[in-house]
Amino acid sequence: MRKLSLIFAGVAVAALGIVPLSFAVAQPTAPSAGARTNSHPTFTWSLPANEEADLLRIASSPTTTPSGEFHQENVVETAFLGTSSQTTWSPSSALFAGQYWWNVMSHDREEFNTLYSPPSPFTVAAQTRVQQLRIRRNSYFYIPDELSITVGWATNVRNVVVEAKLYRGRRLVGRVQDATETFVSLSGDSSTLTWKRPRRVKTGTRLRVVISVRGGGAVASLQRFVRAP
């Protein structure tokens, strides 16, 4: 009866994804649990003397299989570690803003048992910057009263709104915007907005154009002065 109880206890431990105390596992050290990082964090961990590191995985969910492995559909990055004693790694591709969990897969040198460190949480902070702003009057003879506003930016936020507000003094006289999706984090994107001068604004009026790119709690802005077309 005692032997059967121990078997059930072992099954329960495995179902919870808990590594028995008789096995030492790699220990994540940085980013520390709950840390906020940029899109290129450096991961470090410690290894027991009898173990070699194999993989590092980053996932969008902390749930694991009974052995401690992240579910494949939640894995966003996998690093195949180059040397058995490697204890540091940094992704070459920028991570998107958001919450993640990471762990290290290793094995012991004697019996080659596969072991997983417990998932450790971290958050990549939202980051956006405006890289380019070009404003010009449309040269088409049939639409002489339009401004073309081209904005270039880089962000690690998946969805952003690009907006241009035009002021005559302190009075808002126009607003145009574009919602867009980011496909590659921090790779650089651009959008062209078109503003048509309303009749109440005279040609040649000095305008202040305020550009903003916002999403995920991050906002980047820039302003320029132009003459109304």
Image (spheres, helix red, strand yellow):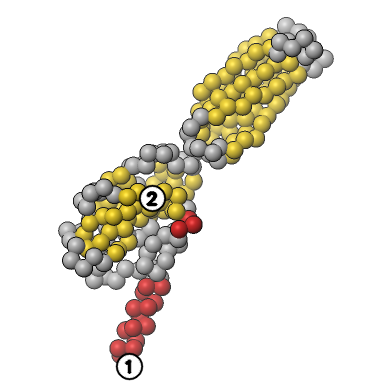
Which of the pair 148/219 is nearer the observer?
148
Examine the rendering and report whether any part of residue 32 can be seen: no
Q: Residue lying farthest top?
A: 204
Say whether residue 194 is left or right of residue 86: right
Quadrant in the picture for residue 194: top right
Binning the other alpha carbons within 10 Å of mark 1 as few (below 14), some (14 to 19) or many (20 upward) gives few
Residue at image position (80%, 12%) is 142
Q: Pinpoint residue 156: horizontal percent, then vertical percent.
A: 49, 37
Say which mark, if any, is on residue 78: 2
Quadrant in the picture for residue 175: top right
- In the image, residue 25 sits, relative to residue 76, either above or below, namely below
- In the image, residue 123 sits, relative to residue 18, either above or below, namely above
Q: Which quarter of the rendering shows the C terminus?
A: top right
- In this figure, which residue is indicated by the disc labeled 1? 1
Q: Residue lying farthest bottom?
A: 1
Label 1 sits on what residue type? Answer: Met
Q: Pinpoint residue 144: horizontal percent, then vertical percent.
A: 76, 11
